[in-house]
Image (cartoon, grey):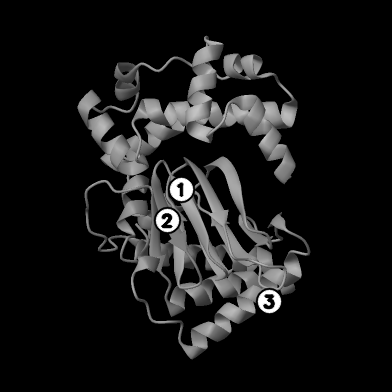
Amino acid sequence: MSLLDQVQAPLDTDMEKQRAELAAIIRRNTQDDGTYATGVSSLFMSRHSKSHDFASVLAQPALCIMAQGRKEVRLADEFFNYDPLHYLVVSVSMPLSGRVVNVTSEEPILAVRLDIDAAEITALIADAGPLGVPTRPTGRGLYVERIDTAMLDAVLRLARLLDAPKDIAMLAPLIRREILYRLLRSPQGHRLYEIAIANSQSHRISQAIKWLNGHFEQPLRIDDLAREVNLSVSTLHHRFKAMTAMSPLQYQKQLRLQEARRLMLAEGLEAAAAGYRVGYESPSQFSREYSRLFGAPPLRDLARLRLTV
């Protein structure tokens, strides 16, 4: 799945300087391991100096750029890798997990994330007029793309604003808009474009995802969901799986189990209570499906997680 499996030319001299400067800015704004909000709206910076797996999360649409290190992201049974040569785009909310390896306190993972608002994409398309973005069949709502000088330069200029806070209010929206424009004009920009166009099937699938994210604890009736987004049942299944690598039922199950795990770990709920909270009526079914997804039944999995915290 990864572009990193192919032989790629390294960053040129100018881009390497940009990468090094971006890494330095991230270091200054992340004193310890973790992910930090910044003074620029929707811009986050992260540092990780230990190899570990990340817990599954419901990732929101975002552009992710690595200034140092490499990260592997998992969607269902597919893996996507990105590093300073490549950026990662999440175009729709999806349950993802990830891991970092071969990192040290001297050479930690250093990354930035810029959250993407679909309404901004729609407004940009309306203002810019025809962008020449080709229509393509529905693809994954997650992709890796080779970074270029223009994209890295724009992200670096946005990060530099942290050292000039008086300029943020005026300049940050302009640079964000430039970054979104460059994403739309990139080789895989059609994935964002189609989701922002109200009558496209990709947009309707994104609406189905949004509905599931907000109602995952409720019984799922595929006919009702198809009517909700104005698609036939067969088209919903086909397009949904093309975008998320899962059927709607599989997607709902991941959301339920991830939320149950969070409830047990963060709020101290017992397994049966957490399962019931997310929509399971049978504790045994909950335990079986939990073990299948996380590799161990709830009590053993939580004990393992607490040891790694």
SS category of the residue bearing label 3: helix
Instruction: Kindly identify the residue that appears in the image at 41 percent across and 34 percent down.
Output: 209
- Amino acid type indicated by mark 2: Phe
Instruction: Kindly identify the residue that appears in the image at 46 percent across and 26 percent down.
Output: 253
Instruction: Kindly identify the residue that appears in the image at 58 percent across and 61 percent down.
Output: 101
Image location of residue 83, percent across then percent down: 50, 68
Q: On the image, numbered disc 2 is attached to which residue?
A: 80
In the picture, the disc for residue 24 is 3
Q: On the image, numbered disc 1 is attached to which residue?
A: 74
| Left or right position of 15 against 227 | right
| Separation (CA) of disc 2 from disc 1 | 6 Å
Are there few (<14), some (14-19), or many (20+) residues within 10 Å of tag 2? some
- Amino acid type indicated by mark 3: Ala
Q: Vertical placement of 69 versus 252: above or below?
A: below
Residue contact at pointers 2 and 1, CB within 8 angstroms: yes
In the picture, the disc for residue 187 is none
Mark 2 and mark 1 lie on one chain; the one further toward the N terminus is 1
Image location of residue 90, percent across then percent down: 45, 51
Q: Quadrant of the N terminus?
A: bottom left
| Left or right position of 56 against 231 | right
Residue 199 appears in the figure: no
SS category of the residue bearing label 2: strand
| Left or right position of 261 against 121 | right
Residue 136 appears in the figure: yes
| Separation (CA) of disc 3 from disc 2 | 26 Å
| Left or right position of 128 against 50 | left
Residue that lies at the very extreme toward the bottom in this rendered image: 13
Are there few (<14), some (14-19), or many (20+) residues within 10 Å of tag 3? some
- Amino acid type indicated by mark 1: Arg
Nearer to us in this view, 80 or 203: 80
Image location of residue 7, percent across then percent down: 34, 75
